[in-house]
Image: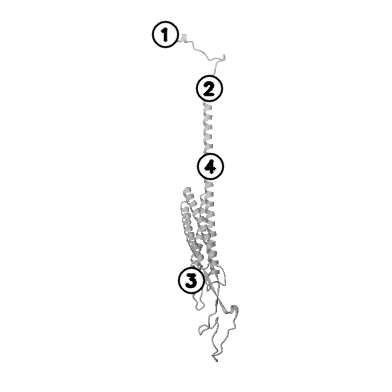
Amino acid sequence: MKTTRKCRALISVGLNFLALFFSITAFITTYWCVGTQRVPKPKCSKLRTHQCIDYGVNETDPNKVVYSWETGDDRFLFRQFHTGIWFSCEENINDEREECRSFIDLAPASEKGILWLSLVSEMLYIILLMVGFSLMCLELVHSSNIIDGLKLNAFAAIFTVLSGLLGMVAHMMYTQVFQATVSLGPADWRPYNWDYGWSFCMAWGSFTCCMGASVTTLNSYTKTVIEFRHKRKTFEQSLREEQAREALGYLSGLRSVSKDLDHYPGQTPQGGSPPSLDLSDTTGSLGEEQC
């Protein structure tokens, strides 16, 4: 039973560690949502001669205006962007570096309260995962003591389940805020098309590992309790059987002793009655001896 319980504890610790790693990685990265933004092409200059629109005048005749025949999407540039919980970064069309803005500032005023709740829930999710991971590690240390291991196992399961529920709520609230920001956010930020990124996948992967760890921990607790009760019941049953065998041996000994006592006076004569003593003869002989 010890080996099986230790294996289940190792599985729970591994799943909880993956959940903690995925959640921290998703929390600090900015690839929850990725996509493209459509921005007008800048004016051509000596430093920029491609992907631009030339609104200049004719060099031979300054009075003649040069028109651009680019229409539709040809008049725009599509720059990549990626957004996380804290920041949103997009390409700089005038430079190779990225420009990052606070996503809290980009969110609509009506959604900022939900966004702050999402941030708080994400932090509590990570904290509870850390507590559950610590309790599971302590359970491995106290694997020889079943009672202490069961207590730690129960608390670890409770903290892990609570963290999973908080993580699920936090992810859903952030998704709602981002979709509202896409429609109601600043005009210079609204994406042309977008999709969920690898940070978002890691966040939900963390939730999946967290739920797997909680189910494994509860299963380990339940199996350990059932096995412990089964062994206790088997021990009590064997103890009762041993006591019953001892009682039967004691009774058989009493019966043999009673049979020996019944045969102790010896065999009776053929007349059927035991021999009797004459008391008068006995007292006469005693008086003669005294004289």
Asked whether disc 2 touches disc 4, contact meaning CB atoms under 8 Å apart, the reply is: no
Residue found at the very far front of the displayed protein:
110
Please identify the quadrant where the C terminus is shown.
top left
Q: Which residue is mark 3?
A: 101
Farthest-out residue, left: 291
Identify residue for label 2.
262
Measured from the top left, where is residue 121 in percent x and y?
49, 60
Residue 291 drawn above or below residue 258: above
Q: Position of residue 36 (x, y in %)?
A: 56, 73
Using the image as rendered, state which of residue 68 and residue 170 is in the foreground.
68
Q: Which residue is mark 4?
A: 233
Residue placed under numbered mark 1 in the picture: 287
Find the distance from the CA under tag 2 to the CA under tag 4.
44 Å
* Element marked by disc 1: helix
Specify which label sits upstream in the sequence, 3 or 2.
3
Among numbered discs 2 and 4, the one appearing first in the sequence: 4
Of the image marks 2 and 1, the number of the one nearer the N terminus: 2
Neighbours of disc 1 within 10 Å: few (<14), some (14-19), many (20+): few
Q: Earlier in the sequence, mark 3 or mark 4?
A: 3
Q: Amino acid at mark 2?
A: Asp
